Image (spheres, grey):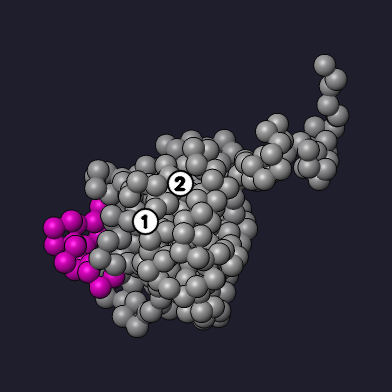
């Protein structure tokens, strides 16, 4: 039973701290697939896979290291955040169900509260309250507004006030998503705001798309930062092309894009189908993919 975990940490500038977080999560049975850093967001995103209990232990150790070294009282970055370890989502993969992901999220959440004294909000599929389904609602007000938030909306685990330096953490279970940033060849935040408003579902845009404008100061450009939480319903090319078309209304072009973390193979199929205009494209058309399947199965395709 394999699950994925994609914890986000509020540190993207001090590489030694990020490395310490990665090293602390080196638990037997857990594989760290990647760690993406962004200096403007001042945030890092880990992707790890493993068995439920091993993965939970690795994420606890990573969270403990983050709490030790990250102080949100001095933290600055453009990405919304409420915790040193900001969010810990579990995603069911091979042989795992969403119920398995919810179960491990709750066990880890309880331990984070008991041992690290972190207030824990359960979100998405693990949420116990309807207002905690959406991560953006849980994180609204950010670290600076936690005390006010907790007065009327206490966490699922832990004390009803923030950890003094590490804030609070959202722990949950969800389906796979695609985190994708589109950098524009302008530094006009108003343009990014209008494009994000057009594309995101909550303001009349595309189904399953969350979008925020971000000011990537180090690159002298703004970006539209998107999470595609239902990529089968809104494939990545559709979201990207809507951003492109909206940008053209303001005389702006796409400079480049960024994939944060990993994407499912089906998303690559969707991209190839869209841009190659080949509706029957499959991963089996990729030589290396077919070779890997041949190695696993030990036989070639059957001719029907």
Q: Quadrant of the C terminus?
A: top right
Q: CA distance from mark 2 to mark 1?
A: 16 Å
Q: Nearer the viewer, residue 221 or 127?
A: 221
The residue under the point 35% across, 83% down is 74
Range drawn in magenta: 143-161
Frontmost of labels 2 and 1 is: 1
Marked residue nearer the N-terminal end (2 or 1): 1
Do the residues bearing badges 2 and 1 touch, measured as CB atoms within 8 Å?
no
Tell me: 73 left or right of 301. Answer: left
The image shows residue 68, relative to residue 256, as above or below, that is below
Give the numbered dot on residue 101: none
Q: Secondary structure at mark 2?
A: loop
Q: Which is nearer the eye, 264 or 127? A: 264
Q: Which residue is mark 1?
A: 197
Give coordinates of residue 165: x percent, y percent: 31, 76
Q: Quadrant of residue 298?
A: top right
Q: Residue at x 32, y 67 (%)?
A: 82
Q: Quadrant of the N terminus?
A: top right
Residue, disc 2: 229
Instruction: Please state if 131 lies on the left or on the right of 204 as rendered.
Output: left
- Percent across and percent down for residue 171 are 37, 54
From the viewer's perspective, is residue 271 above or below residue 248?
Answer: above
**Residue 170 appears left or right of 154:** right
Residue drawn 19% across the image and 68% down it: 147
Residue at the image position 57 percent from the left and 35 percent from the top: 95
Q: Residue 19: where, in percent of width, then height?
A: 57, 74
């Amino acid at each position: 039973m394999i699950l994925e975990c994609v914890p986000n940490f509020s540190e993207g500038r001090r590489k030694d701290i990020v490395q310490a977080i990665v090293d602390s999560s080196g638990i037997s049975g857990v594989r760290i697939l990647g760690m993406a850093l962004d200096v403007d967001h001042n945030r890092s995103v880990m992707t790890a896979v493993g068995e439920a209990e091993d993965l939970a232990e690795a994420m606890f150790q990573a969270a403990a290291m983050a709490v030790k070294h990250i102080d949100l009282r001095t933290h600055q970055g453009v990405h919304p955040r409420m915790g040193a370890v900001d969010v810990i989502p579990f995603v069911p993969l091979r042989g795992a169900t969403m119920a398995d992901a919810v179960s491990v999220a709750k066990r880890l959440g309880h331990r984070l509260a008991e041992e690290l004294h972190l207030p824990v909000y359960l979100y998405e599929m693990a949420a116990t309250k309807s207002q905690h389904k959406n991560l953006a609602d849980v994180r609204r007000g950010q670290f600076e507004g936690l005390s006010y938030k907790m007065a009327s909306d206490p966490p699922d685990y832990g004390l009803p006030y923030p950890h003094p330096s590490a804030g609070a953490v959202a722990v949950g279970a969800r389906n796979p998503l695609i985190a994708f940033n589109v950098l524009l060849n302008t530094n006009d935040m108003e343009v990014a705001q209008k494009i994000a408003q057009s594309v995101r579902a909550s303001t009349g845009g595309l189904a399953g798309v969350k979008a925020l404008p971000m000011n990537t100061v180090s690159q002298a450009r703004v970006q539209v930062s998107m999470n595609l939480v239902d990529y089968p319903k809104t494939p990545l090319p559709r979201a990207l092309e809507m951003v492109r078309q909206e940008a053209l209304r303001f005389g702006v072009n796409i400079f480049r894009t960024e994939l944060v973390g990993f994407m499912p193979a089906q998303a690559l199929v969707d991209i190839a189908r869209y841009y190659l205009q080949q509706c029957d494209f499959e991963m089996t058309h990729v030589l290396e993919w077919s070779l890997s399947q041949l190695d696993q199965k030990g036989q070639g395709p059957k001719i029907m």
